Amino acid sequence: MKNIIAFAGSNSKNSINKQLATYVANQINNVDIKVLDLNDFELPLYGIDYEKDHGIPDNAQNFLNQIKASDGIVLSLAEHNGAYSTVFKNLFDWMSRIDGKLWSDKPMLLMATSPGGRGGASVLQLARNTFSHLGGNIIADFSLPSFAQNFSIDGIVDANLKHELAEATSKFESAIY
Ligand SMILES: Cc1cc2nc3c(=O)[nH]c(=O)nc-3n(C[C@H](O)[C@H](O)[C@H](O)COP(=O)(O)O)c2cc1C
């Protein structure tokens, strides 16, 4: 049995990206899923002076260990002002100080959703452009626009988006096995 981790680039208790990542991870066959929450990996704000004075906090290594121990990553990014949420960028920066190839070549299903019609397209593009320099291995990506309209507990409402997500999920599943 393969192990995948699923998480959102968000620290919101009601994160729509966590809902999407959890839902999608549960669609993947024959895997053990661990849903991670960035709130469980609290970190000081990255700064070179903090790092010099105190070293790298344990939670950066703890999260990196979760990546390393996994066979694949389902990640859905929240978009804040066209970019990563602060909590995600902070974790990302801390982990990159330990390992420049932090994504460790693990197959990744990369997603983003937002309440608006662009579905986090900017942050998705940002990640697609940069993760490959950091050991990223993006197998498929998916953006879900207008979360409230397009997502329900039964899955994706819009038929085209549902099909697109099923294809992305299937590609990811094949890459793990
Ligand atoms: C500071 C801030 C900036 C935001 N900027 C964007 C944005 O650039 N694009 C967008 O689609 N949504 C933006 N939003 C709305 C988020 O997409 C929305 O809060 C969403 O729920 C975040 O995902 P989450 O629920 O997984 O945290 C922003 C929200 C906040 C609080």
Image (cartoon, helix red, strand yellow):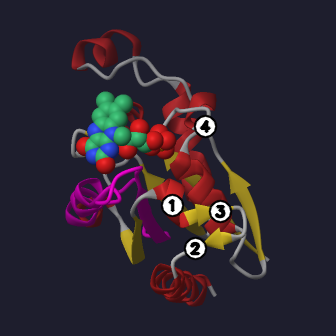
Question: Distance of mark 1 from mark 3, alpha carbons?
Answer: 8 Å
Front in this rendered view, residue 131 or 39:
39
Q: Secondary structure at mark 3?
A: strand
Q: Residues within 10 Å of mark 2 (few under 14, many from 20)?
A: some
Q: Which residue position is annotated with label 3?
A: 152
Q: Mark 2, mark 4: which one is toward the viewer?
A: 2
Magenta stretch containing residue 125, yes or no?
Answer: yes
State whether label 1 is within 8 Å of ligand 1: no
Mark 3: amino acid: Ser
- Pointer 1 with pointer 2, Cβ within 8 A: yes
Residue denoted by label 1: 149
Distance from the alpha carbon under mark 1 to that under mark 2? 8 Å
**Most extreme residue toward the top, as rendered?**
53
Mark 2, residue position: 157
Residue 54 place in picture, x, y as percent: 40, 12
Q: Which residues are magenta?
A: 101-130
* 40 relative position to 42: left or right: right
The answer to whether mark 2 is within 8 Å of ligand 1 is no
Image quadrant, ligand 1:
top left
Measured in 3D between alpha carbons, the distance from the residue under mark 4 to the one under mark 3, in whole angstroms, is 14 Å
**Which residue is pictured at 42% across the width and 58% down the height?**
146
Image point (54%, 24%), residue name: 42
Determine whether label 1 and label 4 are within 8 Å by CB.
no
Q: Nearer the viewer, mark 4 or mark 3?
A: 3
The crowd level at tag 3 (other Cα within 10 Å; few <14, some 14-19, many 20+) is few
Instruction: State which tag comes first along the sequence, 3 or 2.
Output: 3
Circle 2 — which element?
loop
Q: Position of residue 75 (x, y in %)?
A: 49, 58
The residue at the point 29 percent across, 15 percent down is 52
Q: Amino acid at mark 4?
A: Asn
Q: For residue 81, which numbered disc appears in the image?
A: none
Reply above or below: 129 against 93.
below
